[in-house]
Amino acid sequence: MAPRLYFAWVAADEGFDPLVHARADEAILALEIRAVEGEAPRARVSVARGRRRLGGPQGQRHAVMSARLDGGAIVGLFRGVLAEVPDGASGAFLTLLFDARTGDANARVAAALAPYKRAPGYDALFINEGREDEPEEILDGWFARLIVDRLDGAVGVSHGLWGGKNLSFGPGDIAEGSLDLRRPQRSPPAWVEGVVDARWLQRGGGTVDLGALIAREAGGPLVTLSRPEDFADGWPKPGAGLGGASGYKAVTSALVACELPAMEEALGDEERVLLSDEGTTVVVGAGTGLAGGQGVGFGPTAARSSLFPMGSGAGWICFAKRAYWPVLTARWEIRQSRRQSLSCRLESHLAVDWPGASEGERLSFGLRDVGAETQVPAADPAPCDCASLLALSRPKGGGQSAEIPPTGLSAGGAETAIGDPLHASFFHTPRGRRAVAHMLRVMAVRLAFAQRCVSLRARLPGWSARALAIDLDTTLSLVAAALPGGRARGKVVDYRFVWQGGGCWVEVEIACSVGGGGSMAPADPGRATYAEDYADDFALTTGGVVRGDEGDGLDVAIFDYAADQPTDRLAGAFAWGAADLVSGLCLRNLAAEQDAYLWTHRQGAISPKRLLFDVPTDVCLALRPLAADDQIHQTITVQAAGRFGLPPTIDLRDGGHG
């Protein structure tokens, strides 16, 4: 005997009460309640056509359906909201369609999904902007589906194989001849290969203390015999570019004069000494000829004396030394377009050999820009050769130097996925490793749903409280001699509660796994994994095997790729120091060299002042070229440390499964 059905129109916020709602506001002729994985439960109710408007007597749009079972217990069947248009109309009857999604369904979905918006199952870098809250995007890395409770509209998330409840039905519960076991015609994918592509603009820079390098090379201040207008006045000015479009600009720059004893303090009361007005030269013995042929010592302040032109004014001349402490801090900038691709193939582990050729599936993921900018400005490809620092600082073509960016490492500003955009590798950063972990989980989820490929349908006659407890959060075990191995277990993916023509039954479909279990290697003891608490270090080196630690059976182990670093000339920019930026430094014609040149070339026919112009003091640098190349593309291939497989829930090796 079929149970008695009840139908009650209720207010939108009115919950089910078996004592209140066991009434017949509508005369039910037939009822079907159905839910399919990925969809909300719906009820189709055939009722007698009335003269009043569609809905309850007070305009209610919500209704509760329940049944009195054998033994007198009243069980709620469904609560939902009426669709705008009747599903069907035939003569004196109407078929009404109700949807279990009641209340603020969007808010309920968002609340149910909120715990799943976390790594490694969720990664916004993989999602197009504006779709971050779409359910299919959030659950892309979880072996799970949204479910809606047919009694109160609550929204939850259910695992793809293990539901929140477990039910079992044996031979006495299953209608004879109703079992229908189906397997796919083609083999599940033998593997999934994923390729994730990251693009960004490597950009930023830092400051380098060139002055300290110059002073270290000189052993202290720069000592010269050259006049200020021939050396000090040509030192780079703050804001000046060093080498045109080389990527270097002076930030702080000066030659700080260091005091030396005045020359006259070292000359005593020598009557033959004549000191020039500007204090740059000393003339000794003018008009006394070249007697002695030797230089005259003037103390540490001046260079050795040299001959000045012959004639009645012939004599000796020397030049004052000047000492300067070099101050030069330069800002450097790079802008290099980069692309990095990482691929991995994950093999499927099945419990049975499938006939036919094994094929796989390829997935391709393009991440959002992991930096902030995408346009690469034109760069001067000319190499930056070792050249005069004084010449480097001079404006080209009369142009003025642009304003200098703020000092400090990197481009600064908005936060980026790569962290410091000076990094030349994304997938070696902690954030990049989490992106890799997400791709591996998405691949595992694809294989998991592919391995859950055997469906089993059964019909349970009558309505029992146990049968009516079936929902899409149920793992169901069916026991029957007709099944391979005598039993099968799987996740409910479709069910129907049917009441019509004086009879009632439950139809159910479960999805069974033919996976062979996972064979992933464990992480090396003491090695880092894909946990959220990664140290914020670039190019974190772990080595060996690493794997996720979510613990839900979707963690994929891989052989670490820490050694696959980029090797191009801008790869190490994030850690550059002064020694990395200066490939050559030479100091030309400091005071000692100038003095030696004058002494070696002394002769009465040439003025020492003329000779000094031949050996001007100069500082020469060879700076690392910073000009950008075309887009630099690095590829990384990662090897999985094992095969992925769900635990088997049906044994097809036993045959007889049709």
Image (cartoon, rainbow, N blue to C red):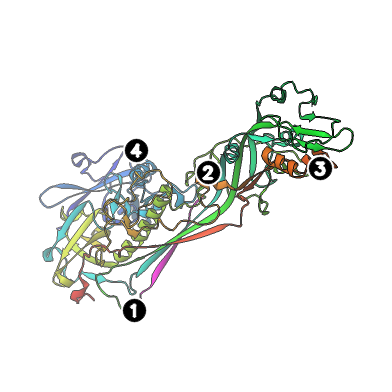
Rendered image quadrant of residue 170 = bottom left
- At label 4, the amino acid type is Gln
**Which one is earlier in the sequence, the residue at label 2 or at label 1?**
1
Q: Residues within 10 Å of mark 3 (few under 14, many from 20)?
A: some
Q: Earlier in the sequence, mark 3 or mark 2?
A: 2
Q: CA distance from mark 4 to mark 1?
A: 62 Å
| 398 in magenta | no
Q: Is residue 143 visible?
A: no
How far across and down, in percent of the image, does residue 253 sit? 65, 33
Q: Nearer the viewer, mark 2 or mark 4?
A: 2
Give the CA separation, mark 3 to mark 1.
99 Å
Q: Nearer the viewer, mark 3 or mark 1?
A: 3
Q: Earlier in the sequence, mark 3 or mark 1?
A: 1
User: Is 253 or 160 nearer to us in this picture?
Assistant: 253
Identify the residue under disc 1: 356
Give the residue at mark 3. 603
